[in-house]
Amino acid sequence: MADMEREADTGKVVRQHAEMENFFSGGFAVKVPKGEPKTQSSTKGPASAETVKALEQIAEQTGQCRKCELGSLRTNAVPGEGSAGARIMFVGEGPGADEDAQGRPFVGRAGQLLDKIIAACGLKREDVWIGNILKCRPPGNRDPRPEEIISCLPYLQRQIELINPDVIVALGAHAAKTLLDTTKSIGQLRGIFHEYYAGIGHPPIKLMATYHPAYLLRSYSPDNRRRVWEDMKKVLSELGLAVP
Ligand code: URA
């Protein structure tokens, strides 16, 4: 290999390493030149009043829902939150103890990591939408049961239809397998765009699957962190947003 090529190659590896370390080192600060805004918008602009109202109605319905036994076990339903005009929807598995207590998605440890991932992308939490497959917490954070998913999924399907994002990011195996209706593993699904079908006559929505932040916290290896960052970079490129 010519010297110049080797230097360019080494430079690329060093840059990628620094980028990854910055992303997951806890600093998460997005370094941008002075004078430029630190964040970029990921909304399509304000949603219509009807859309906002319909989303509020879904939130109310989840609070009353007794379609499965989780309805009688919850402290609060966690319908999801964020911009009704979001271009990105993050979908996790189901609320944990912190989310059940607050009625808000991803507010515990996994949520703090998701916040860092969103910030590292140069995005604001309030510009995206964050929710789950299940709106109520499974006891002891056990896996969602098929009958619970079947009962709950229509809420999310309607939320997706209303928000109509450009990209859905499925966080973890449960979200990815449910939304894509597949038994493939998250390892097989992540890293490439899939298509989510929101209904007849509705153009398919791009879906990127990636590791769940809770999994990442448990298996905090450089390889897993790099994989999530690579997945998010693809999402930003797909949206035509800058990769910080
Ligand atoms: N894990 C999830 O899947 N969703 C949350 O809201 C919190 C943790």
Image (cartoon, rainbow, N blue to C red):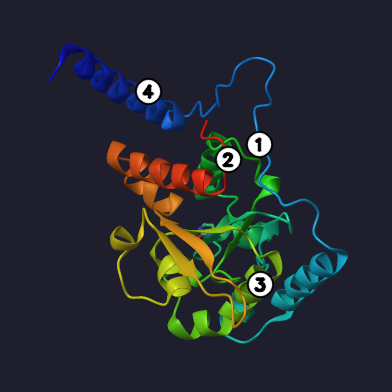
Residue at screen point 73% across, 80% down: 64
Label disc, if present, on residue 241 of the rendered structure: 2
73 relative position to 25: left or right:
right
Q: Nearer the viewer, residue 159 or 191?
A: 191
- Pointer 3 residue: 161
Q: Nearer the viewer, residue 108 or 23?
A: 23
x%, y% of residue 120? 53, 35
Q: Of the two numbered discs 2 and 4 on the same chain, state the one appearing first in sequence.
A: 4
Distance Cα–Cα, label 1 vs label 2 = 8 Å
Q: Of the two numbered discs 4 and 3 on the same chain, state the one appearing first in sequence.
A: 4
Q: Of the two numbered discs 2 and 3 on the same chain, state the one appearing first in sequence.
A: 3
x%, y% of residue 52? 81, 65
Distance Cα–Cα, label 1 vs label 4 = 22 Å
Find out whether the residues at labels 1 and 2 contact each other: C-beta distance under 8 Å: yes
Distance Cα–Cα, label 3 vs label 1 = 24 Å
Q: In front of the other: label 2 or label 3?
A: 2
Q: In front of the other: label 1 or label 4?
A: 1
Find out whether the residues at labels 3 and 1 contact each other: C-beta distance under 8 Å: no
Q: Amino acid at mark 2?
A: Leu
Q: Which image quarter: residue 102?
A: bottom right
Q: In front of the other: label 2 or label 4?
A: 2
Q: Secondary structure at mark 4?
A: helix
Q: Amino acid at mark 4?
A: Ala
Label disc, if present, on residue 18 of the rendered structure: 4
- Pointer 1 residue: 40
